[in-house]
Image (cartoon, rainbow, N blue to C red):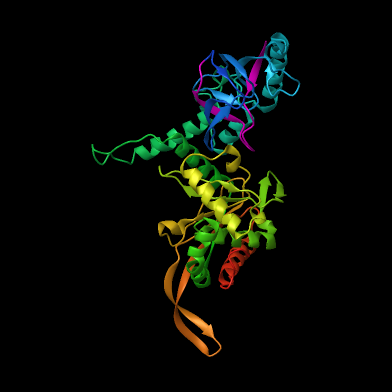
Amino acid sequence: MARMEILMPTMGESIFECTVLKWLIKEGDVVDVDDMILEVATDKIDTEIGSSHKGKIVKFLVQEGDIAVIGNPICEIETDNVSKTDSGKPAEKEPEVPEMAGELEKSIEDIKSQVVSSENTSGKFYSPLVLNIAREENISFSELEKIPGTGLDNRVTKNDILAYLKSKTQGVESQNVKVSSETDQIVEMDRMRKVIAERMVESKRIAPHVTSFVETDMTGVTMWRNKIKNTFAEETGENITFTPILIEAVVKAIKELPGINIQVDGDKIIYKKDINIGMAVALPNGNLIVPVIHNADSYNLIGLTKKVNDLAKRARNNQLKPSELVGGTYTVTNIGTFGNLSGTPIILQPQVAIMAFGVIRKLASVIETPEGDMIGIRQKMIISHSYDHRVVDGSLGGMFVKKVSDHLEKFDVNRKIHS
């Protein structure tokens, strides 16, 4: 019987580590392949990890509360099923520690010599990311050296310097804020809210946001949906909301103006081949999550309806897979479900644009006819389009939201359900 290491599996693009929440087994337990053994949290979702081997768990290599790195071992297992294709690796075949330590020390010294400024007289190591944040926030080395570090050898991590900046801001604000009442309730942000907050601030710092607005006549779409919704439910087993219709219009516009389906990488622009639409979903606890419809252009309206309903339901029940939260190239949010007229949503990095659909409401409008202008009641909606002005100019940003509006206003009211 061989002793193997079970590795933390890949959990999707851009996820490099996760937090260990809870072991679902005990040391000494016997497990089968794909038995759930560990609950973890990423910056996107809480999920469970299955065993890659069948055997007896003999030792935990990470503990609850630890940060587990993707690809690193999380526990040791005794198993008879050892082959060259195993995702784990024999525990006894680890590289020589002295050799690895020597190479690691050399690498660290090389990095230190490259990234630590001559201003740093303490000899402490600071990563390029921490130094970059310090430079952008005008933090001197003397101030940086006073920040307590929680990393290896008490090094200052990204979270340490961001927490320091936050405390500085709160300290200044608190000088002008008085406690209004002894009955005020102070509640600590949950982990997801902290992640959302950090990402929103980061996005506003990275991308100069510009927002364009268009008022859209949704009369045709509304009439068609009201006419077919009962038949649609009977034939497909799904309730059709406005969301899949809106996403369909966005997909059509992306095909016509693919310059909006891009990402920024330093000084490079990446034109994304796939059209992966993120859809913002409000959770019961007030937080927000954005599952992704991958290859949204491959679905017809029935397929989009099924996908939208399924992702929204599982999002609210915390049943999404990590792979369903990554890879988005463009995001939409239907704020009309909350009765909002319009909004200026924040871009979800590394995307360059996001669209918000407001509430559909009846308005008196001027209608152009061959006989002249008339006043009529129309179903109107405001669409807002926020985009990254580094790479999307007002012409493209404005044309794109108008394209989406045009597709909705020209919706075929005689359309068949299965077309």
Measured as percent of width and height from the top left, residue 184 is found at 27, 39
Residue 107: percent from the left, percent from the top?
Answer: 71, 20
Point out the residue furthest to the bottom here.
371
Res. 247 image quadrant:
bottom right
Of all residues shown, which one is farthest toward the left?
A: 182
Q: In this view, does 122 lie above or below 401?
A: above
Image side of residue 235 versus residue 285, left or right: right
Q: Quadrant of the N terminus?
A: top right
Residue nearer the viewer, 316 or 340: 316
- Viewer-nearest residue: 42 or 124: 42
Residue 313 drawn above or below residue 245: above
Which residue is situated farthest in the right direction here?
A: 84
Q: Per the image, is 17 magenta?
A: yes
* Quadrant housing the C terminus: bottom right
- The answer to whether residue 227 is above or below residue 282 is below
The residue lying at 40 percent from left, 60 percent from top is: 339
Frontmost residue, 155 versus 184: 184
Stretch in magenta:
1-26
Q: Is residue 198 magenta?
A: no
